[in-house]
Image: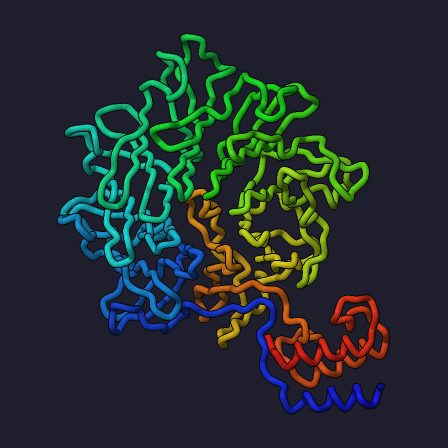
Amino acid sequence: MRSRFLALLASLASTAHASPPGVTATTLLKPGDPIPGLPGFTFAGADGSTAINNAGTVITSAIITGPGISGSNNHVLLAGQPGSLALIAREADPVNTLPGYLHLAGSANLSAFPWVAIADDDTVACTAAVREVGQTANLIAFMAGPIADVRPVLYQNGPAPGFGTDTLIRLEQPPTLATGGRLYIQGRPFPTSANVVWTGDHTSQTACLQTGLQAPGLPIPTTISSFDDESLRMNDAARVTLRVTLALGGGVTQANRVVLYEGPHDQLGVIARTGEPVPGYPAATLTGIDADTIRTNDAGAVVWGGTVTGGGTDEVLIARGSGTDALLVKDGDPIPGLPGLTLDQVSRHTVEMNALGRVAFTAAIAGAPADADSGLFIADPSGFQLALREGDPLPGGGTLADVRGVNFDFNARDQLVLYTAAVTGQTSSGVLLATTPSGQLVELARSATGFASDDGFAGTVSATHPWSVPFEAGSAQSGQRSVFNDEGQLIASLAFTGSTGSGVFLFDIEDPCAPDVNNDGVLDNGDIGAFVALFLAGDPAADFTGDGILDNGDIGAFVAAFLAGC
């Protein structure tokens, strides 16, 4: 058998071919690349505002160079499929459909387009700095629309829809965006002191919620005191979730004045209120609702975290699906597979929910030694499991440090991306990590180390601010800016040392290529030799059929995989 085996593998040498590793990195923009729509101008650097949808369409802001370029006109906004980007707007150019206004022309700003988002139908939204011609005040505009017609929706000093001659003096958090260009936006008209939520598309907005008016679903006259600037979420069915603080009086006290709403904007329903039993866990009383933990998805599920008293716990995560509330996890829950260890601080850190209603969250691990006292978990109504733990070895060396302060994304394939995860035992200031669909941890980039894309770009990643950390990024299912899609694609801006500058890259994160046995990214004689060595040594890694036996079936499976490529 051995002679036939070796002869068969030897015959594969002539068919060896290049194969990408499980993770590929493609350069979208690098220094010197031409800027679409601006002949003679080239890409000079990334400024960090990026997003991607599930169709792989991207939006990114960029810094350009060329004749007549200065700090007052060197920012542009681009969008489209990789390789066919289109110019949306340029600093110092007129603002589309808004005569007399220019995109901010001043060198003091870090970016003319600090926030961007893109829906699955390629509708885009952005926050833009603008200035009225002849004026010195820098204003903020929320813009949205199809790529060919991105226009201001609401802007400072502009009209406040539904408020007569009042003008908009303040815009709150960035808007939420859904397909069809549907938006929810918070702002304040002047001279009223109201805080208002508007809804509509890029052509028209209507006020739908306002402070000082009756709170939906509650006894008259219970009124809204304020909206939480960080809580507004919207799914693709235009269902809204937000936290509201009620005005005191008429039975409203400090203990019961915080409400969580969900539903269409004109049919909002109360799904949780402080001072009442915790939904799905009546043994505890809700004392607080954490706005940062609120997430929704397009199926209508909601997850949120809160603080509680009673019931033997302090913090909870509650999941809502099909109109039913359930306790997802709580402080004190035993961690599966880790006897004697329990969850702690479950609602204090990042929470994300994917399209399937599964929830990823970070928490402390009570009862663990100091070097392994935090973890990242994945939960659904059937239970939860540990995905990554402080102290886990990293592919590039060192171990994972405390994950509680790490921002992350979570897609429909249960893949995770961790931004600037800290490293123990290395001088590196951070790593950009992801998991493959099968759960394998991979390293995409590491500060102060070399980086090479699959299309030939190479450089040393900066030791400080190595990539733009999307603090406000999250699931597009909640109407937020998303840089990681459900196909496992991540768009990221990386900075490099020296003259290499910075670039925008698209990572495609899949499972590794099985026949690339030596993991060098190429299918060649090296993989054949590595497989032979494993097979002859009886190593389980050569069990390509997964039946626990090394035999001709594994040889055939390896040959088939090698010939098919990856």
Q: Quadrant of the N terminus?
A: bottom right
Q: Residue at x 54, y 43 (%)?
A: 353
Horizontal side, residue 453 vs residue 269: left or right? right
Residue 125, placed above or below residue 190:
below
Residue 109, placed above or below residue 247:
below
Question: How are the residues colored?
Answer: rainbow
Front-lying residue, 418 or 460: 418
Residue 7 percent coordinates (x, y): 77, 91
Residue 402 in view, yes or no: yes
Residue 11 percent coordinates (x, y): 70, 91
Front-lying residue, 322 or 57: 322
Residue 420 in view, yes or no: no
Residue 521 percent coordinates (x, y): 62, 75
Residue 551's quadrant in the figure?
bottom right
Q: Residue furthest top?
A: 250
Residue 191's quadrant in the figure?
top left
Residue 287's quadrant in the figure?
top right
Q: Quadrant of the C terminus?
A: bottom right
Horizontal side, residue 314 vs residue 249: left or right? right
Front-lying residue, 380 or 395: 380
Q: Residue at x 78, y 44 (%)?
A: 337
Horizontal side, residue 514 vs residue 237: left or right? right
Residue 432 percent coordinates (x, y): 57, 57
Q: Residue at x 38, y 51 (%)?
A: 119
Q: Residue at x 17, y 48 (%)?
A: 98
User: How many numbered marks does the figure carry?
Assistant: 0
Horizontal side, residue 459 vs residue 77: left or right? right
